[in-house]
Amino acid sequence: MLCLGIEGTAHTLGIGIIDSSGKILANVMRAYTPARGGIHPREAARHHVKVAGETLHQALQSAGITPEEIDLVAFSQGPGLGPVLRTAATMARALSVWLNVPIVGVNHCIAHIEIGRLVTRARDPVTLYVSGGNTQVIAFDAGRYRVFGETLDIPIGNCLDVFAREAGLAHPGGPRIEKLAKKGKRYVPLPYVVKGMDLSFSGLLTEAVRMLRQGVNLADLAFSLQETAFAALVEVTERALAHTEKREVMLTGGVAANSRLRQMLKSMAREHHAKFVVPPRELCGDNGAMIAWTGLLMYKSGHRQKLQATQVLQRWRTDEVDVKWRKS
Ligand code: AMP
Ligand code: MG
């Protein structure tokens, strides 16, 4: 069985094709980069519409298949930016109707976990999912992916990006902050906010920007921003790990590219005798293969969806999905 998955929640339009054994036949991505500032939802959607045809063509070509060989179409139904979600959904509906194959709407956050489990062979990890639009600590329990902790305001990737923008650095800021942080020598105290099991980064961002304007060294600030934010992320992940007594920790999302965050999580996992895994970079960021794979898992576990039930869900939560493809 072949599933074609369409990812469209933010800056990336991704199309992936995967078979039932988990073999990724194609994983093509096209990213929208704003000329300045952050992502404008309608601009991003417009970009995706423009590249949709060629992205689809390229995915089919790299998989070496014809459209007729596709048995199932999956798409990111949420959460994400409204205009972008609707673009991906429209594309998926058109394909489903044209090819006369079933359609499945996939939760984006869960797709990150499922592709990670597939390629890292982690069976039941505590996952730290950190990206431009999401920050969650997730673990499977009693039929659902439970959110053990999450940001109460902005996601960590967004925090890094906005700080970088304030410092005059180009988008995306995360990698640039990482590079600068390596040159930082002095830790500047910044607000460290963990509330219960949840996180908050907006005060941290405000204070870092304020210090920047006061003339505090940029490299020192980049270093301190990373140390503070990552320590909070690791603290919450550690508590979820201790509570659930799971044996694996997975890091995914665009911010998973950060080597300092990897190092910190890895040493925490080691202290708990847990295995630490990170999927390859192209499967950490938003991609179509993860949607295709999760759609396939859902379909094989009996999930059926009418076309009328494919309206996008901008605020679809990770813990609202009944995970029928995993044993409780
Ligand atoms: P995503 O939303 O999953 O596509 O991830 C994009 C986010 O990852 C953006 O906020 C980037 O700034 C961030 N990012 C990418 N590479 C790094 C890095 N090396 N360190 C920190 N953040 C990063
Ligand atoms: Mg994502």
Image: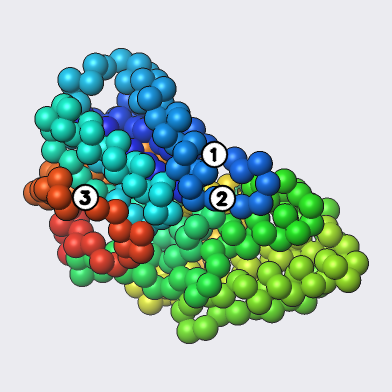
Point out the residue furthest to the bottom here. Answer: 196
Asked if marks 2 and 3 touch (Cβ < 8 Å), the reply is no
Would residue 231 appear left or right of 23 to someone viewing this image? right
What label does residue 32 carry, if any? 1
Asked if marks 2 and 1 touch (Cβ < 8 Å), the reply is yes
Asked whether mark 1 lies closer than 8 Å to ligand 1, one says no
Asked if marks 1 and 3 touch (Cβ < 8 Å), the reply is no
Amino acid under label 3? Thr
Q: Residues within 10 Å of mark 3 (few under 14, many from 20)?
A: many
Please give the residue where the numbered disc 3 appears in the rendered image. 310
Mark 2 vs 3, N-terminal side? 2
Please give the residue where the numbered disc 2 appears in the rendered image. 39
Question: Residue at point 30% right, 58% down?
Answer: 313
Q: Is 49 or 60 nearer to us in this picture?
A: 49
Question: Residue at point 52% right, 44% down?
Answer: 43
Place of residue 300 in the rendered image (x, y in percent of width and height, measured from the top left): 13, 43
Q: How many marks?
A: 3
Mark 1 vs 3, N-terminal side? 1
Question: Residue at point 29% right, 54% down?
Answer: 312
Amino acid under label 2? Ile
Question: Relative to 56, is 274 above or below?
Answer: below
Q: CA distance from mark 1 to mark 3?
A: 24 Å
Point out the residue furthest to the right here. Answer: 215
Q: CA distance from mark 2 to mark 1?
A: 8 Å
Q: Residues within 10 Å of mark 1 (few under 14, many from 20)?
A: some
Would residue 275 appear left or right of 161 to someone viewing this image? left
Q: Is residue 206 visible?
A: yes
- The quarter of the rendered structure image containing the N terminus is top left
Instruction: Tell me where residue 327 sits by quadrant.
Output: bottom left
SS at circle 2? loop
